[in-house]
Amino acid sequence: MKKTVLLLFLIFTTFWTVFSNPTDTTKITGKPLFLIYSNFHQGISEAANESNFDVKRAYLGYDFNLNNGFKGFIKIDIGTPDDNSQYSLIRRDAYLRSVGMSYSQKNFILSFGIVDNQQHKTQEKFWGKRYLFKSIIDEYGFLSSTDLGFNFKYKFNSKLSIEGGMMNGEYLSLQNGFLKYVYNFGIDYSPIEQIKLKLHSSYTGKISDIITSGFFIGIKPIKTFRLGAEIVTQAEVKESGRYWEYVYNIFAVYNLTEKINIFARYDVLSSNIPSGYNIPFNLAKNGTAIIGGVEYIINDNIRASLNYQDWYPMAANMQNTAYIYLNFEFGIFESYKRI
């Protein structure tokens, strides 16, 4: 399937390059994408005392600027598998993170293929430290960061924009009917330059009715300080009852200089107690996380961070974990802004 998608993409790119407008002599340009997240970490709790070097992710790709407002893109994600086996640190999974085409005209952009979900992009950009921790909607698996389908964004003015999309849900599905798709909608609003607001919601009826909604506020009262807070809820409606998951966080970043900043973030993940349960239904995944430290922007291509990260589960029979991390991000042509 991946080879087929890539082949179709190349054929479609060639088609538009050659036949879209023979009289348009606009030069076709491109920009490579190369980005690496690596770290050294040392456990400092009883349940987490290992010490390791790790390359968490590597992104490779290329963006094509075609004629008449069309663009093509392909990005490969090479990362650590999401499992706890003893081999996960030496294995790497590679997959097409995104591949497709987009069309833009003035304040409108439409993308098709394996594309980014836009629900978390405003928060992720405001947080600015994805190589350390993703935004909560992505970090805790409420929605996938990319999916197969289409999305659009329309910017009314400098203050207001809307977005929407229709996705397969986890790339591929053999189910029939329109209920299987994930439908996304979001609003970005900045009443003043110092405030960012994001309201988003998603729906799918693939297995049961699942509604994911969230609200984010980012405040930048002064040039050197920014504060953000977000809450996301996911409701799954079944015949046996309603199952709610909640995640919220708050973070702050203060720039000591143009190259050095300090930051702190606090996440909380919880779930409800449905009818017939005595404890939260998703207790094993509920807990709190803290991340805090200092970041040094070495140059336009490299940044480093010394930070503390922990996870305190809500289940009494699970142990706390805490680590000291030294994280690095390396990318060319500001690749971190294109992930």
Image (spheres, rainbow, N blue to C red):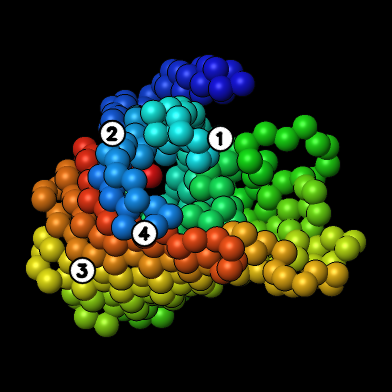
Residue at image point 29% right, 62% down: 308
Q: Secondary structure at mark 2?
A: strand
The numbered disc on residue 262 is 3
Give me the residue at 17% from left, 45% from top.
302
Which residue is tagged 2? 34
Query: Looking at the picture, does residue 302 appear above or below residue 257?
Result: above
Label located before the other in sequence (2 or 3) = 2
Instruction: State the CA–CA distance, disc 2 to disc 3.
Output: 26 Å
Task: Point out the frontmost of discs 3 and 1.
Answer: 3
- Residue indicated by mark 1: 113
What is the three-letter code of the residue carrying label 1?
Gly
Tag 2: amino acid: Phe
Which of the marked residues, 4 or 3, is nearer the chain's N terminus? 4
Callout 4 secondary element: loop
Q: Quadrant of the C terminus?
A: top left
Q: Secondary structure at mark 3?
A: strand
Which residue is disc 4 drawn over? Answer: 45
3D distance between C-alphas at marks 4 and 3? 23 Å
Q: Are marks 2 and 4 in contact (CB under 8 Å)?
A: no
Q: Nearer the viewer, mark 2 or mark 4?
A: 4
Which quarter of the figure has residue 150? top right
